[in-house]
Amino acid sequence: DAGVIQSPRHEVTEMGQEVTLRCKPISGHNSLFWYRQTMMRGLELLIYFNNNVPIDDSGMPEDRFSAKMPNASFSTLKIQPSEPRDSAVYFCASRPGTANSPLHFGNGTRLTVT
Amino acid sequence: AQSVTQLGSHVSVSEGALVLLRCNYSSSVPPYLFWYVQYPNQGLQLLLKYTSAATLVKGINGFEAEFKKSETSFHLTKPSAHMSDAAEYFCAVSDLGAQKLVFGQGTRLTINP
């Protein structure tokens, strides 16, 4: 079990550029979550998917953010255009589709927007 | 809607001393409760979980937590702190009807030699 794999680990970009974060969940897990972590706001749930379908995107900050899950083994989180306030660590997590199952987190992508 | 409150954003203890990290939850139905640990530059790792079986739950690295319904609490303890326990700890709640996990703000644990 390779765990949840996120890429890149670090991303530095300039304001206005498009940023794409990638996630490969654990095989067999049918729920996938995107979180953002900052010092000020802690861990925020951005969006989650069940069986590749977005269920709740109420945490997505603005229209500049979008997420897709084209198949069970891949998801992307895109920011276009990026802004300095988007700087944070973005985590992807997956789990089997039951509420009492724990989330398995990737190591995160540290995004810096200058 | 569920929510979690972690009392104390920073806790500092001496090596060998008792560790107590506090978590109170709010849930309208029987909850599922979790403690996670985050080491620097890593994702969150599961320490332990409560899913309505035994109220005293044992986890990894010598940690345990007790579910107290009357107090709506799920505090994390470890009898003797080790330097390697220095990390950030998160309490989280979900329930049978909810699909998402709600996290507390985290408690940063520092161990003094």
Image (cartoon, rainbow, N blue to C red):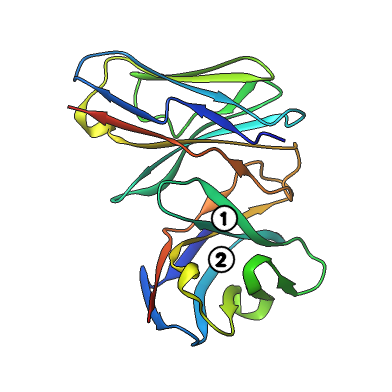
The quadrant holding residue B108 is bottom left
Give the vertical position of B51 relative to B94 (above or below).
below
Q: Is residue B28 visible?
A: no
Image quadrant occupied by the C terminus of chain B: bottom left
Query: Looking at the picture, how far across and down is residue B2, in whole percent?
Result: 57, 55
Query: Looking at the picture, how far across and down is residue B50, in whole percent?
Result: 72, 64
- Give the mark nearest the N terminus, 2 or 1: 1
Q: Chain of mark 2?
A: B
Q: Disc 2 vs disc 1: Cβ atoms closer than 8 Å?
A: yes
Q: Which residue is mark 2?
A: B25
Residue that protrudes farthest toward the bottom in the picture: B17
Distance from disc 2 to disc 1, alpha carbons, whole Å, reads: 7 Å
Q: Nearer the viewer, residue B58 or A49?
A: B58
Q: Residue at x 47, y 46 (%)?
A: B42
Q: Residue at x 47, y 65 (%)?
A: B5
Q: Residue at x 69, y 19 (%)?
A: A72
Badge 1 element: loop
Query: Looking at the picture, how far across and down is residue B73, in whole percent?
Result: 59, 74
Query: Looking at the picture, how far across and down is residue B28, in whole percent?
Result: 65, 60
Q: Chain of mark 1?
A: B
Q: Nearer the viewer, residue B76 or A27?
A: A27
Mark 2 crowdedness (10 Å alpha carbons): few <14, some 14-19, many ≥20:
many
- The amino acid type of the residue labelled 1 equals Gln
Q: Which residue is mark 1?
A: B2
User: Is A38 left or right of A74, judged from the image as shown?
Assistant: left
Mark 1 crowdedness (10 Å alpha carbons): few <14, some 14-19, many ≥20:
some
Q: Is residue A9 visible?
A: yes
Q: Residue at x 44, y 67 (%)?
A: B86
- What count of labels does the image hold? 2
Give the vertical position of B13 relative to B95 (above or below).
below
User: Is B43 left or right of A52, judged from the image as shown?
Assistant: left
- The amino acid type of the residue labelled 2 equals Tyr
